[in-house]
DNA sequence: TGGTTAAGTCAACGTACGATGACTTAGGAT
DNA sequence: ATCCTAAGTCATCGTACGTTGACTTAACCA
């Protein structure tokens, strides 16, 4: 048993963030109330506004994702290695903090709200795509990079958001091989 | 000038559906109020419930999409022809009724709501994927079909929902060639 | 012209929401 | 033991929402 109540701002803030992650992931932004999140932690709803300012800022901080360092800092690392990792992280990994989903997909769940859409676009377009583009061959590497991003994001949507049958049942290894084949076909220098 | 007010149930219903399509496409399900939609038509909000039962049923009917007949009724039609058409319809076409977006993407905007998610999954998994799968070569055609669907859906998200720069500026023809290359690589029989 | 049907309106209910500001209470330092 | 700061609470405001049932009014037919 833990002692009944310890006053610890940092811990309470962290608990609120965790509860918010679960709720937002499961129910989306509009489907989640501040009162719910506070009740999960056993705390008054007013604390949320004390610590985060508004529901919007709480969401923004809860789903913010740090791009893993070491993924792209070696410029010689081939594109397929990066997509292997991202396929695992975005499509197959079990993000316990977010009820199983990758935070990018949690954001997409609430893509009706412009602020969340902007956050998602910034994360993808400025966080991931440049690393794709600079490893991409052929003409218009930016377009090809966005197609790789579209493939991974779309697979995440299909599997984790929609629960499409084949992707839900597929093994990571089998899927990885197919994605690698596509990425290779895209980054190929030859015109056809 | 049209005469000031004609009482016509069918016409009013259709106007409500059109207004709902625009609002839902622009603002999502939760961001749109029944009062707004009714005001666009110049009609009392209660009419919405008279004609559609509830806001949920209005949305369901507004974004329901008929899969274009003639697209897949010829079993000899190659997969790349179908993906060409879908790339145009889902990613590039300007759906005026839906503020420019394809109805599938309008649904995805409100994917926080389970009923809408179910509708979206049914449309994709039962409407489009079987036609992909039966034209797909290699092992596990269902998985490969879902990857084609993921690519197209993801490109729609990137271009029309997020407004990613490269896809927004790209020509249909240039993009079509790249998609065709990917679909060919996927449906190829050879193991590598 | 009167009456019936259906299209459209009106007023309101109940609820849930995000947010605010004043208050209370715990806990460590003096 | 006391005071002070900050963690947490309480009551409440205003608003917007989906939805309902009773009412009004227009159009068509006899």
Image: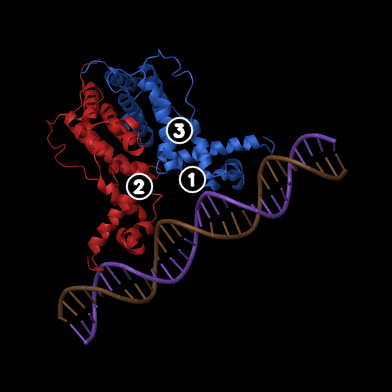
Chain colours: A red, B blue, C brown, D purple
The reply to whether discs 3 and 2 touch (Cβ–Cβ < 8 Å) is no
Q: CA distance from mark 2 to mark 1?
A: 21 Å
In front of the other: label 2 or label 1?
A: 2
Residue at label 3? B103
SS state under label 3: helix
Q: CA distance from mark 3 to mark 1?
A: 16 Å
Who's the residue at 47% across and 35% down the image? B99
Q: CA distance from mark 3 to mark 2?
A: 23 Å
Secondary structure under the numbered disc 1 in the rendered image: loop
Quadrant assignment, res B134: top left
Mark 2 and mark 1 residues within 8 Å of each other at the beta carbon:
no
Please name the residue that numbered disc 2 is placed on. A26
Q: Disc 1 sits on a residue from what chain? A: B
Q: Is residue A130 left or right of residue A155?
A: left
Is residue B19 visible from the viewing direction of this image? yes
Using a 10 Å C-alpha cutoff, classify the residue at mark 2 as few (fewer than 14 neighbours), some (14 to 19) or many (20 or more).
Answer: many
Q: Position of residue B53 (x, y in %)?
A: 57, 43
Image: A84 above or below A16: above
* Both marks 3 and 1 on one chain: yes
Quadrant where the C terminus of chain A is found in the figure: top left
Residue B130: % across, % down: 39, 24
Q: Nearer the viewer, residue B191 or A115?
A: B191
Between residue B146 and residue B157, name the one nearer to us: B146
Q: Name the one closer to the observer, C7 or A52.
A: C7
Say which residue label 1 marks. B32
Q: Mark 2 — on which chain does it sit? A: A
User: Which percent across, then down, holds residue A134?
Assistant: 19, 30
Q: Secondary structure at mark 2?
A: helix
Query: Dot 1, crowdedness within 10 Å: few (<14), some or many (≥20)?
Result: some
Residue at image location 40% in from the left, 30% down from the top: B124
Q: Which-is-in-front pick, marks 3 and 2?
A: 2
């Amino acid at each position: 048993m833990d002692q009944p109540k310890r006053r610890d701002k940092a811990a309470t803030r962290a608990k609120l963030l965790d509860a918010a992650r679960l709720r937002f992931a499961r129910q989306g932004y509009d489907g989640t109330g501040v009162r719910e999140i506070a009740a999960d932690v056993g705390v008054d709803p007013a604390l949320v506004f004390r610590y985060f300012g508004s529901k919007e800022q709480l969401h923004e901080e809860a789903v913010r994702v740090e791009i893993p360092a070491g993924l792209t800092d070696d410029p010689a690392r081939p594109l397929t290695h990066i997509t292997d990792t991202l396929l695992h992280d975005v499509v197959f990994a079990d993000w316990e903090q977010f009820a199983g989903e990758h935070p990018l997909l949690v954001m997409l769940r609430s893509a009706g709200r412009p602020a969340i859409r902007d956050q998602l676009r910034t994360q993808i377009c400025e966080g991931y795509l440049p690393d794709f583009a600079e490893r991409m061959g052929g003409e218009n590497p930016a377009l090809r990079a966005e197609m790789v991003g579209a493939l991974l994001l779309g697979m995440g949507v299909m599997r984790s958001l929609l629960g499409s049958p084949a992707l839900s049942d597929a093994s990571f290894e089998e899927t990885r091989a197919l994605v690698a084949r596509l990425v290779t076909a895209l980054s190929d220098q030859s015109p056809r």
